[in-house]
Image (cartoon, rainbow, N blue to C red):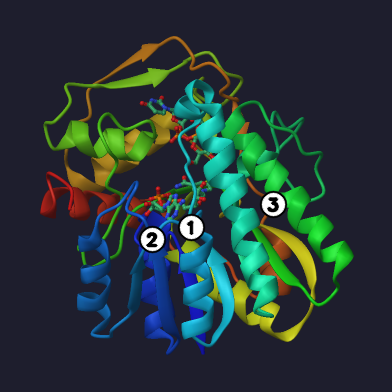
Amino acid sequence: MEILVTGGAGYIGSHTCVELLNSGYDVIVVDNFSNSKPESLRRVEEITGKHLKFYESDILDKAILEKIFSENNIEAVIHFAGFKAVGESIKTPILYYHNNITGTLILCTEMKKHNVKRLVFSSSATVYGMPKSVPISEYFPLSATNPYGRTKLMIETILQDMYSSDKEWSIAILRYFNPIGAHQSGRIGEDPNGIPNNLMPFITQVAVGKRDKLNIFGGNYATHDGTGVRDYIHVVDLAKGHLSALEKIMKTSGIEPYNLGTGVGYSVLDLVKNFEKATNKKIPYVITAPRLGDIAKCYANPIKAKTILKWSAQKNIQDMCIDAWRFQVNNPNGY
Ligand code: NAD
Ligand code: UD1
C-alpha cells in the first residue's frame, strides 16, 4: 500500500517512515528540505534496508503534487510538512499562514481530485491554548496564543468543513504533546537549526559541551517543583501512533482528533535529573524569567487513542533521555 508522507525528511516524519517501511508499506516522501536534510532519508533507508521514493519539492507547488498523485497509486497521506517554531511564527506570520495553511489547501485539493480521501494530520497540543485543568481531553475548548498555533487550529477547522461537505473523507487529527528522543540506532533524531527552542535538544547540546548551561524558564509555576510540566513522548512511540491512526482511517470514514501523549507530566527539573541519571552527565542550569506564552502544566488524557486506535506509549523517560543522548553523541553537528 502506497502512503504519501509530506515532510517525511523531518524529525517526526523520518521516524514515521522507518515504522511504515518496517511494517511493509510503500513510502513516498515529498519534502523541500526547508528544515531538514536529504541525509535523514538516506539513513531511513539504511536503518530499514528498504527503499523509499522521494520527491524534492514544495507542497505549495500544485504541478508537482499533481504529478505525484498521477504517477503513484497513493491510498493515504500523512501530512507533516509545515513550519513549527512559535517565536518565528510571531515574527513572520504570513510565511507561517502561507506555508501551513495554503500548503494544506493545495494538498487537499489534489487529494480530492485524485480521489485520495484518507489523511493523517499533524496537529499539536498547542490547540488547547491555556487549558483550565490537566489532564487534557480531546473535548476541551480549543484556542491558540500565537500564529503557529492558529495555523493548526485553522487547519483542523478546514478539515472539519471538508469532511462535512464530503463524508467520504477519513481523517485522523493527531494532537502531539512533546516529542523527544530519537531512534534507538542513533542514526536519526532531532537536528534543530541554530539555538534550540525546545528543552531536550537544548539539554543534549549542554551535555555535549556546545552550550554552557540550560536556562530554565520560570521557577515559580504552580507545579511540584516550580518548573513547567509537560507530557514528553518518545518520538518512536509517536511514529507508531501514526500507523495505528492509518489503520483506523483505512477502515472507516469520519474525522476524529486524538491526543498522542503518555498521560504523565514531568517538570523541567525532572527531565534534567532523569537526563543526568541516564547519561551520567551534569547539566548546569540557572532559573530565569518565564518564557512569554508558556503554561504551567500540559499533559494528555490519552484514553481515546488507547481505546479507539489501540495505541499507547511504551517507552519511559529514561528511554527518551538515553536515545536523545545517543543521537547527539553520534552526531555532534547534526546530519
Ligand atoms: P520538522 O521541521 O522536523 O519537519 C517538517 C518537515 O516538513 C521538514 O522536513 C521540512 O523541510 C518540511 N516542509 C516544511 N514546509 C514544507 C513545504 N512547504 N513543502 C515540503 N516540505 C516542507 O518538524 P517535526 O518536528 O517533524 O514536525 C512535523 C509536524 O508535526 C509539523 O507539522 C509540526 O508542526 C507538527 N508538530 C511538531 C511538534 C514537535 O514538537 N516536533 C509538536 C506538535 C506538532
Ligand atoms: C513548544 C511550543 C509548542 C509546541 C511544542 C512542541 C512554545 C512557546 N511552545 O511547547 O507550540 O507545540 O513546543 O514542539 O515554543 N524550557 C526551558 N528552557 C529551554 C527550553 C524550554 O526551561 O531552553 C521549558 C519550557 O518553559 C517548558 C518546557 O521546558 O516548560 C518544555 O519546553 P519546549 O520543549 O519548548 O516545549 P513547549 O513549551 O511545551
Q: Can residue 260 be seen in this view?
A: no
Q: Are marks 1 and 2 in contact (CB under 8 Å)?
A: yes
Residue at (48%, 17%) from the top-left corner? 291
Q: Give coordinates of residue 47: x percent, y percent.
A: 23, 76
Does residue 165 sit above or below 321 in this rendering? below
Label 1 lies in ligand 1 vicinity (Cβ under 8 Å): yes
User: From this viewpoint, which residue is outermost toward the front?
Assistant: 63
User: From this viewpoint, which residue is outermost toward the top?
Assistant: 289
Give the residue number, with chain letter if any, for mark 3: 301
Q: Can residue 157 be seen in this view?
A: yes
Q: Name which residue type carries label 1.
A: Asp
Numbered tag placed on residue 57 in the rendering: 2
Q: Name which residue type carries label 3.
A: Asn
Secondary-structure class at tag 3: loop
Q: Is residue 172 left or right of residue 184?
A: right
Secondary-structure class at tag 2: loop
Does residue 145 sit above or below 59 in this rendering? above
Q: Give coordinates of residue 80: x percent, y percent.
A: 50, 57
Label 2 lies in ligand 1 vicinity (Cβ under 8 Å): yes
Label 1 CA crowd tier, 10 Å (few <14, some 14–19, many 20+): few
- Number of numbered discs on residues: 3
Numbered tag placed on residue 299 in the rendering: none
Q: Name which residue type carries label 2.
A: Ser
Numbered tag placed on residue 61 in the rendering: 1
Q: Give coordinates of residue 112: x percent, y percent.
A: 70, 72
